[in-house]
Image (tube, rainbow, N blue to C red):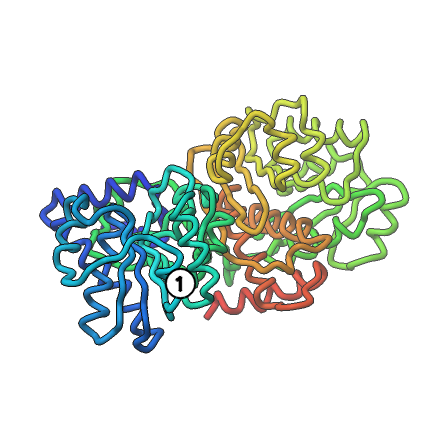
């Protein structure tokens, strides 16, 4: 049975390979280009009425797509003008074939060529750009941006790296980006994610078995099917018993995490607390279990299978010793916030239990100072090196597994940038992993749910809202 590959993301090299394999299977390149151009023209004519359109065509296949769009729009009665980068006689292959089908003159790249445009199609470079945008191209793209009209990018806004999402020199802001077969990683990594506008993935005839053969390791996070629904015959111990090492002063962080863990389905949550904080936790949410026993005694119960340490923890030698002790247990372990800071110098690569690290960018750099590259590649390298699942937080959160799998999360809103949001995320992951999900699946689903809570809550979201929004989000999954 063929696998569902719709959420797989391709690298630029993998997209080239998919094209080549498809051509070798008997579908010509000119047919693929016609399908790509047709998909772009369809998106344009569905959204806008005929208007003066300028199509910016590059010297390669992206420009060839642009020639197809020009011909199809012209045939529908649109006024179309093409600005071509380079000489028309220098075009090759399928791009030349489609340029030859365009019966009108083209104009050279120039900011002046943009001035009367009511709609602009960016078919200059696409996802495969490897050098900075500069010179007349940069000037023309800047003029296009200043025209303040709809901009449709073909494959990728020119100037955006298709793999990393980073800007090469300068990049154009698109209203929509039409890409083909599968989205690329650069469509969902910042700043590319913002510059793409709405991403439309068009089917141009590349079949699923070809994607299976390429076996991409990257996906767009779509984990809703993983949720561990309670069974009719089950009981609370079937749903896992998580433990949170309680912070001594910032007790709110621990409480937020505990509430989210329980809301997402954990059967029981115990807060391990000492000193004055013990009574704070005892007098708060009645559904939380609270213990001031020695942590080793608490964890002696085999039913307590997953531990979260970090929210509100603080820094100190005693706390550092706690982290070290937990690394030596066979419990599933989530290390967040201050616990990550105290990982330095400890070996967590050969634990008996699963490990989830949840750093933001600053914590990641302290943990893995020698790892560079795109966000996706840094997370992948860190997971491989540490033998842990790495949840690298941010507006474009990336989750990476030690075996090379990576996913980019697309749920959430800017309102998640609020105190306690990360503690809530760690608690959601705790609740899922203690119910039996592995650390990668738990991190994927936890991040997705966390973002969905923000989308459901809308403006004014604060971290206290997240646990109360979880049931509403889960109800949508039931439906």
Q: Which residue is mark 1?
A: 151
Determine which quarter of the picture holds residue 295: top right
Whether residue 436 is visible: no
Q: Nearer the viewer, residue 32 or 255?
A: 32
Give above or below for 439 relative to 478: above
Q: Secondary structure at mark 1?
A: strand
Residue at (61%, 47%) from the top-left corner?
430
Residue farthest front in this picture: 112
Q: Nearer the viewer, residue 286 or 387?
A: 387
Residue at (53%, 41%) from the top-left corner?
439
Residue at (53%, 37%) from the top-left corner?
389
Q: Nearer the viewer, residue 271 or 298?
A: 271
Give above or below for 344 relative to 154: above
Estimate the x, y position of residue 43 in percent, counting from the top left.
31, 68
Estimate the x, y position of residue 220 in percent, counting from the top left.
42, 51
Determine which quarter of the picture holds residue 140: bottom left
Give above or below for 332 relative to 350: below
Residue farthest left in this picture: 26
């Amino acid at each position: 049975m063929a696998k569902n590959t719709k959420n797989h993301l391709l690298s630029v090299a993998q997209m080239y390979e998919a094209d080549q394999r498809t051509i070798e299977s008997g579908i010509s390149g000119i047919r693929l280009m016609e399908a790509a151009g047709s998909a772009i023209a369809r998106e344009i004519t569905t959204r806008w009425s005929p208007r003066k359109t300028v199509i910016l065509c590059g010297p390669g296949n992206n420009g060839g797509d642009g020639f197809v769009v020009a011909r199809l729009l012209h045939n529908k009665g649109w006024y179309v003008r093409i600005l071509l980068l380079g000489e028309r006689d220098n075009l090759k292959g399928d791009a030349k074939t489609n340029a030859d089908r365009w019966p009108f003159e083209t104009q050279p790249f120039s900011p002046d060529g943009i001035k009367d445009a009511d709609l602009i199609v960016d078919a200059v470079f696409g996802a495969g750009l490897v050098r900075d945008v500069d010179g007349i191209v940069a000037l023309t793209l800047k003029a296009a941006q200043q025209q303040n009209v709809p901009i449709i990018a073909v494959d990728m806004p020119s100037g955006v790296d298709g793999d990393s999402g980073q800007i090469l020199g300068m990049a154009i802001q698109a209203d929509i980006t039409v890409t083909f077969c599968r989205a690329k990683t650069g469509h969902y990594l910042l700043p590319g994610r913002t510059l793409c506008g709405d991403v439309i993935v068009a089917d141009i005839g590349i079949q699923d078995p070809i994607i299976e053969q390429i076996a991409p390791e990257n996906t767009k996070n779509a984990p809703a099917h993983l949720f561990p629904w309670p069974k009719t015959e089950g009981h609370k111990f079937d749903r896992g018993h998580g433990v949170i090492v309680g912070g001594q002063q910032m007790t709110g962080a621990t409480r937020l995490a505990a509430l989210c863990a329980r809301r997402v389905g954990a059967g029981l949550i115990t807060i391990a607390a000492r000193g004055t904080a013990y009574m704070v936790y005892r007098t708060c949410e009645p559904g939380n279990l609270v213990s001031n026993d020695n942590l080793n005694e608490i964890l002696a119960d085999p039913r307590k299978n997953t531990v979260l340490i970090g929210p509100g923890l603080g820094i100190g030698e005693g706390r550092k010793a706690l982290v070290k002790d937990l690394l030596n247990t066979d419990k599933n372990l989530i290390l967040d916030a201050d616990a990550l800071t105290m990982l330095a110098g400890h070996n967590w690569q050969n634990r008996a239990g699963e490990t989830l690290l949840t750093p933001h960018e600053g914590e990641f750099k302290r943990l893995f100072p020698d790892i560079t590259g795109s966000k996706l590649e840094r997370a992948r390298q860190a997971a491989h090196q540490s033998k842990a699942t790495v949840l690298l937080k941010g507006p474009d959160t990336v989750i990476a597994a030690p075996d090379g799998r990576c996913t980019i999360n697309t749920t959430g809103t800017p309102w998640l940038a609020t105190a306690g949001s990360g503690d809530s995320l760690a608690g959601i992951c705790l609740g899922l992993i203690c119910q039996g999900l592995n650390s990668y699946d738990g991190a994927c689903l936890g991040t997705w749910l966390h973002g969905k809570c923000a989308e459901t809550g809308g403006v004014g979201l604060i971290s206290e809202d997240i646990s109360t929004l979880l049931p509403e989000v889960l109800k949508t999954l039931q439906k």
